[in-house]
Amino acid sequence: MTDKQLKNISKFLSLVLRHRPEVIGIKLNEQGWVGVDELLEKLKAKGKNISLEQLEEVVKNNNKKRFAFNEDKTLIRANQGHSISLDLGYEAVEPPRSLYHGTATRFLDSIQKTGLEKRNRHHVHLSEELDTATNVGGRHGKVVVLIIDAEQMHKDGFKFFVSENGVWLTDHVPTQYILFP
Ligand code: HQG
């Protein structure tokens, strides 16, 4: 498959596995999983005929490891980024001392007032790498990277989760833990 084909399939899978499974008439279970056979069948019925091999390629080569199979490869789900409500079953873990959040400069005033909010997603997304945060923020406009005092948040009882693809997730980051530029 070309990079473009991979990207197109990945985008459509993000839509159905994170936000709108009903678009192709599937339901995700509580942890976000759906049967691989059922997914392929329903995709086909919508004119998106992709083979198991192609799906495997998307899961394996997706640049951000957005999707995962279960052990016997009968089920598939998105690793994070959902807007529909479910329980991914991640356990709270101790975060690194600091984490980064990339955002756009035009959001700064608002973030200074309310802290980082999860908006349409289940969590606020944070990363261990400056590069990743810079890319994430750049999607929204002129990028600015905020440094989060994760160590202090953890001490104060805030819960952190890490998704299978290494994205750090938390519920809300109040302003006092944010280092603004
Ligand atoms: C901002 C991508 C104003 C927040 C990435 C962000 C990530 C506020 C935007 C994942 C705010 C939400 C998530 C406040 C937060 N006032 N703006 N109080 N609090 N914001 O896309 O973190 O490609 O939902 O800074 O790689 O940009 O989907 O979140 O700019 O991991 O796999 O509100 O999405 O992954 O935007 O990105 P998003 P995000 P995927």
Image (tube, rainbow, N blue to C red):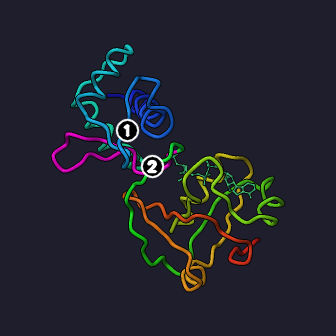
Q: Amino acid at mark 2?
A: Leu
Residue 43 in the image: x percent, y percent? 35, 22
Quadrant of the rendering where the N terminus is positioned:
top left
Quadrant of the rendering where the C terminus is positioned:
bottom right
**Residue at point 61% right, 58% down?**
134
State left or right for residue 116 relative to residue 110. Answer: left
Q: Is residue 79 magenta?
A: yes
Residue 50 in the image: x percent, y percent? 29, 23
Q: Is residue 53 magenta?
A: no
**Residue at point 49% right, 70% down?**
160
Give me the C-alpha separation between circle 1 and circle 2: 9 Å
Q: Give neighbour class at mark 2: few <14, some 14-19, many 20+ (Cα, 10 Å).
A: some
Residue 129 in the image: x percent, y percent? 52, 66
Residue 99 in the image: x percent, y percent? 56, 71
1 or 2: tag closer to the N-terminus: 1
State left or right for residue 157 relative to residue 146. Answer: left
Q: Which residue is tagged 1? A: 28
| Residue 152 against residue 146 in the figure, above or below | below
State left or right for residue 4 relative to residue 121. Answer: left
Q: Which residue is tagged 2? A: 86
Label 1: which secondary element? loop
Label 2: which secondary element? loop
**Residue at point 63% right, 65% down?**
172
Q: Amino acid at mark 1?
A: Leu
Q: Which sits in the foreground, 145 or 110? A: 110
Magenta segment = 67-82
